[in-house]
């Protein structure tokens, strides 16, 4: 576990986002990911991946191996979406999922029954991704200052396009986007996300807060207007997450 200092999400210079805006952003975020999943499935990519995984597993030789296969195939869709959020490329993401399968299969004994299997595989996938990236390119500044690049005003009707949401997500610092995806889309607890990311729980909370704050501003909510929108229920759940 990392010993990095905990980031403080309550910095005095930050405006407080209302629960309503957090909820609206969550709704848009969930919709954007659902639309992306539908597009990928329509292209047949996921069916191809499942076929490859089925071949890779072969015939399970024991009850434990059969259960491992069942659990992995169950989390494969979520694992693949997480891989895409990291790699930004479907082919690379599918390769990453297959690599994760092989690594997880070789290290089955390290999984503790009764714990979160999905979080365990997320950790393996994330480690594989960054290990591969270090071999081919320099590691980006983890907390890079992307705020200046996050100016994406809403359209003339004042409505947000899903492409705007995707663009804003892509422009978040990688660790902020990753924390947001793990907690709000993959529904991991902050403790589980901290294990996956190899950092402290407070750091995960800070990154999620900062990601949501930057998304709000990127999608047309200046500091003077934050707190004025009361529309849309959603997936982020507002302040209820803080105690998770």
Image: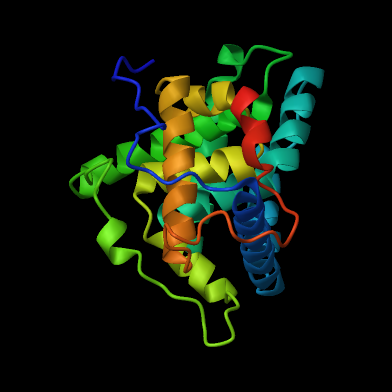
Q: Where is residue 154 in the image (x, y as percent from the top left)?
A: 50, 77
- Residue 69: % across, % down: 73, 33
Q: At x 45% / y 50%, what residue is drawn?
A: 213
Name the image quarter holding residue 206: top left
Q: Is residue 13 above or below residue 44?
A: above
Q: Quadrant of the image for the N terminus?
A: top left
Q: x, y (%) of residue 14?
A: 37, 43
Q: Of 186 and 12, which appears nearest the observer?
A: 12
Tell me if 94 is positioned left or right of 55 in this view.
Answer: left
Vertical arrangement, residue 18 with respect to residue 157, above or below: above
Coloration mode: rainbow
Question: What is the residue that sits farthest to the right in this orientation?
Answer: 63
Identify which residue, 76 or 108, lies in the foreground. 76
Q: In this view, does 135 lie to the left or right of 87?
A: left
Which residue appears farthest toward the left when viewing the image?
138
Residue found 38% across the figure and 54% down from its top: 172
In this view, 90 is above or below 238: below
Quadrant housing residue 244? top right
Q: Is residue 65 visible?
A: yes
């Amino acid at each position: 576990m990392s010993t990095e200092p905990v980031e403080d999400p309550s910095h005095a210079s930050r405006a407080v986002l209302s629960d309503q805006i957090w909820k609206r952003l969550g709704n848009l975020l969930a919709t954007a990911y659902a639309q992306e999943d539908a597009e990928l499935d329509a292209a047949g990519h996921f069916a191809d991946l499942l076929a490859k995984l089925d071949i890779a597993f072969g015939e399970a030789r024991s009850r434990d191996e059969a259960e491992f296969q069942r659990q992995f195939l169950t989390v494969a869709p979520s694992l693949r979406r997480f891989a895409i959020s990291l790699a930004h490329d479907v082919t690379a993401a599918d390769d990453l999922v297959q690599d994760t399968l092989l690594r997880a299969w070789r290290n089955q004994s390290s999984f503790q029954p009764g714990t979160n299997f999905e979080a365990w595989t997320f950790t393996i996938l994330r480690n594989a991704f960054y290990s591969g990236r270090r071999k081919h390119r320099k590691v980006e500044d983890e907390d890079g200052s992307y705020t200046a690049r996050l100016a994406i005003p809403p359209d003339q009707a004042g409505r947000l396009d899903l492409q705007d949401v995707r663009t804003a997500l892509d422009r978040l610092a990688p660790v902020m986007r990753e924390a947001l995806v793990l907690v709000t889309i993959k529904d991991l607890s902050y403790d589980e996300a901290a294990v996956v990311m190899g950092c402290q729980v407070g750091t995960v909370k800070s990154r999620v807060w900062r990601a949501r704050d930057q998304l709000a501003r990127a999608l047309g909510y200046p500091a003077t207007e934050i707190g004025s929108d009361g529309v849309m229920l959603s997936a982020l759940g507002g302040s209820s997450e803080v105690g998770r």
